[in-house]
Structures are given as C-alpha cells and as structure tokens.
Image (cartoon, grey):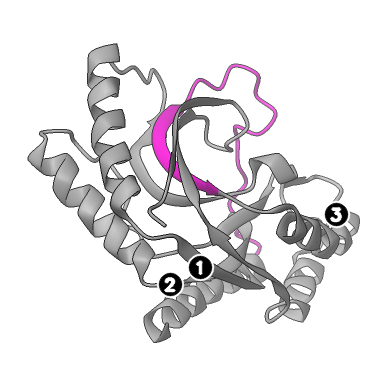
C-alpha cells in the first residue's frame, strides 16, 4: 500500500507541475472520427454506485471546463494489463487471438477475486484520475499473466509494467482556460471515497484508447 501511495503521489505531483505551468497534455485524438488505434487488454468494470459517485465529483470540473472530456460511466474501467497497447493498424490473426484468450482465461480462472477501495482524485499532465487501492491478488495475477504469456510465446507489449489501479475519468480536449481552478477542484477531492467493491470477473477486450469502442473477446470469472 505504501508503494501504491508513493506511486500516486508521484503521478499527482507531475500533473500539478504541468498544469501549474500551463503545460497540460491536450489529447489530439478526442473527437476524431477516424481514430483507428486499438489494443488488446484485460480490464475490470466498476459497479454503478462507484461510477455514480465519480460522476457526482466530476460535475464541478465540467463546469470549470466545458471542453473537458469525461468518460461515460460504461467506459470507466481499471486496466489489469495492456497486453498489446492501443496503436494504429492493430491486427491479430484469429488463431493468435484464440491463444491469448486461452492463456488469459486459464490464468484468471485460477485467481481469487480482487477487493477494491477507490478514494481520491489525482492529476496527470493529461488527465484526471481516481486512485484505486487493491488486494494483493491483483499483483499476483499480473505476474502470472506475464509469466504464462511469455512461456506460451505470446508477446506482452505493455506501454509499461503497471502497478497502478487507477481509473482515468477525464481528459483534456483543449488547453485549460483556468488550470488553477481545475487544480483546486481536484485537490478538494483528493481523499474523497468513491466506494468499495469486489471484482468477480475480468474481460478480455479489443478496444480503443478510451474503452468506448469495445469488442469483447472473453469474460472470465475469478476463482471463488
């Protein structure tokens, strides 16, 4: 937990520095209809009471910046692993995709459910995020997935080997008209609790960068 707190503090500090210097990262793909970036990922969904609480907290931010892109509740998710990071021209041979599906399903089915506590907003240079704190089973699952996929000669092309359990809830679609206001609003909710829940299944998906266009490959329940 201390390592996770330190990770989130570092992300948040970087975000604060960027916004304070008016160097926020504007996403050039938001609103672009021909964005063909796709990737293969294992993700977890959020229950309704958590997304409802997040949306309530986002309302003042929407007022401060009408151009802020806020994720619809159905698109909010936690990434277990970006197996193949989203990129233009993504393609997987059906037989290869079936191999990924088999190894991921076998690994998830042996793993225990994951307990979550979501609390606090934080900033990155390009987004507003919710901090997620999880039981140890997530770290074990990630390690087993990396090991088993490698042994099956199935490349894992993560952008980075994440330890995070955050939820990206908003992105900057344009330069912020009042970055100080955004910083203050995020800081006001830096310890706000969004709820507890247990993830009982995981979805293997081919999806876009925002988890808005999604093809479900497989949905697997964790071991009881």
Along the line of sight, the residue nearer the viewer: 174 or 189: 189
Q: Is residue 31 on the magenta stretch?
A: yes
Name the spot of residue 209 as percent of width and height, x first.
52, 36
Q: In this view of the protein, can residue 24 be seen by the observer?
A: no
Badge 2 or badge 3: first in the primary sequence: 3
> Residue 135: which numbered mark, if any?
2
Name the spot of residue 109 as percent of width and height, x first.
33, 46
Q: Name the residue under label 3.
A: 62
Residue range corresponding to the magenta coloring: 22-44
Badge 2 or badge 1: first in the primary sequence: 1
Q: Main secondary structure of the magenta part?
A: loop
**The C terminus - image quarter:** bottom left
Name the spot of residue 154 as percent of width and height, x first.
17, 33
> Residue 101: which numbered mark, if any?
none
Residue under the image location 70 percent in, 28 percent down: 31
Of all residues, the one furthest to the front in this rendering is 224
Mark 1 and mark 3: span between their CA atoms? 30 Å
Q: Name the residue under label 1.
A: 115
Q: In this view of the protein, can residue 115 be seen by the observer?
A: yes
């Amino acid at each position: 937990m201390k390592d996770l707190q330190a990770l989130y503090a570092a992300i948040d500090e970087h975000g604060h520095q960027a916004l304070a210097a008016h160097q926020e990262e504007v996403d050039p793909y938001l609103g672009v209809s021909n964005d063909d970036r796709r990737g293969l990922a294992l993700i977890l969904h959020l229950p309704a009471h958590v997304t409802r609480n997040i949306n309530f907290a986002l309302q003042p931010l929407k007022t401060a910046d009408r151009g802020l892109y806020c994720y619809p509740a159905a698109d909010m998710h936690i990434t277990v692993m970006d197996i193949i990071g989203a990129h233009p021209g993504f393609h997987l041979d059906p037989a290869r995709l079936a191999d990924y599906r088999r190894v991921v399903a076998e690994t998830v089915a042996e793993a225990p459910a994951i307990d979550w506590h979501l609390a606090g907003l934080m900033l990155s240079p390009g987004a507003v995020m919710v901090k997620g704190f999880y039981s140890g089973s997530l770290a074990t699952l990630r390690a087993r997935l990396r090991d088993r996929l490698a042994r099956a000669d199935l490349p894992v092309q993560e952008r980075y080997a994440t330890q995070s359990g955050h939820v990206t809830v908003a992105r900057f679609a344009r330069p912020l008209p009042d970055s100080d206001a955004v910083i203050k609003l995020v800081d006001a909710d830096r310890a706000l609790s969004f709820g507890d829940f247990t993830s009982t299944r995981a979805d293997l998906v081919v999806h876009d960068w925002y988890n808005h266009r999604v093809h479900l490959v497989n949905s697997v329940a964790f071991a009881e």
